[in-house]
Image (cartoon, rainbow, N blue to C red):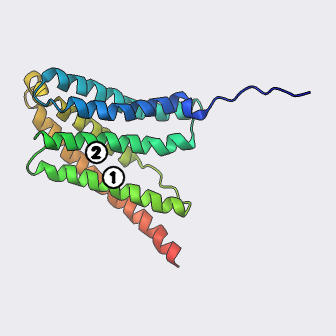
Amino acid sequence: MNVVLPRRRSTALNLANMLTYGRLVAVPVVVALLFWPQDDTARWIAVAVFVAAAITDYLDGYVARTYSQSSALGRMLDPIADKLLVAASLLMLCADGTIRGWSLWAAIVILCREILVSGLREYLAELKVGVPVSRVAKWKTAVQLVALGVLIAGPAGERVLPGNGTLGLVLLWLAAALTLYTGYDYMRSGIRHVIDDER
C-alpha cells in the first residue's frame, strides 16, 4: 500500500521570499519613473514604490525570523535586492542631476563599498566563513534608504518642503561616512581570514 504524503510547499514561495521578490520588481519600476525627473507625479509615485520596497527590507527579515521562513534562496536574494535598489536609484539620481558636484563622491563611496563587500562575502563563502551584519551596518542601510527616498522626491519634494534636496544630500554624506566605517570593518575582518587561510 502506497502512503500518500502531503505535498510540501516550496520555500521559494513563502511570504519572506515574496517580499524580497517585490523589492526586486520595484527596482525597474523606480528606474522607469525617474526617466521623467521633472514630472511631479512620476516623482511621488517613485517615492511611494521606493518606500514600500524599503519597508519590505525590514519585513522580509522579520517574517523569516518570526515564522521560521529562512531559506538559502532568501539569504542569497535579500542582499542582492538591497544592492540593486540602492545602486539603480543612485545612478538615476546622478543622471538627472539630483546628485551632482562633490556629492557624486558620496555616491561613488557607497557603490564601491557595495562591490567590495559583495566580493569579500563571495570569497569568504568559499572558506565557509559567514560575515554577520553589524548594528552600524543596519544603521547605515536605514540612513541610506531615508536619504535616497528624500532625494527621489527631488524638485517635487522641494516644492512641499523647501530644503528637501539639501537634507537628502546631508543624509547621503552621513550614509557615505557610515559606509566607509562599515566597509573598513568588513575588510579588516575579511583580511584576517585571508591571512589565516594563506598560512
Q: CA distance from mark 1 to mark 2?
A: 9 Å
Instruction: Using a 10 Å C-alpha cutoff, classify the residue at mark 1 as few (fewer than 14 neighbours), some (14 to 19) or many (20 or more).
Output: many
Q: Against 141, is 187 above or below?
A: below
> Where is residue 3 drawn, in percent x and y?
85, 27
For numbered disc 1, what is the local secondary structure?
Answer: helix
Q: Against 32, is 78 above or below?
A: below
Query: What residue is at 44 percent from the left and 49 percent from the top?
Result: 133
Circle 1 or circle 2, nearest the eye: 2
Q: Against 185, is 194 above or below?
A: below
Residue at the extreme right of the image, as rendered: 1
In which quadrant of the rendered view does residue 29 lie? Answer: top left
The first of marks 1 and 2 along the sequence is 2
Q: Amino acid at mark 1?
A: Glu
Q: Relative to residue 164, is residue 25 drawn left or right? A: right
Q: Work out whether residue 187 or residue 156 is closer to the camera in this orientation and state it.
A: 156
Q: Work out whether residue 86 or residue 158 is closer to the camera in this orientation and state it.
A: 86
Labelled disc at residue 87 = 2
Q: Amino acid at mark 2?
A: Ala
Q: Which residue is mark 1?
A: 114
Labelled disc at residue 53 = none
Instruction: Using a 10 Å C-alpha cutoff, classify the residue at mark 2 as few (fewer than 14 neighbours), some (14 to 19) or many (20 or more).
Output: some
> Where is residue 175 drawn, in percent x and y?
25, 46
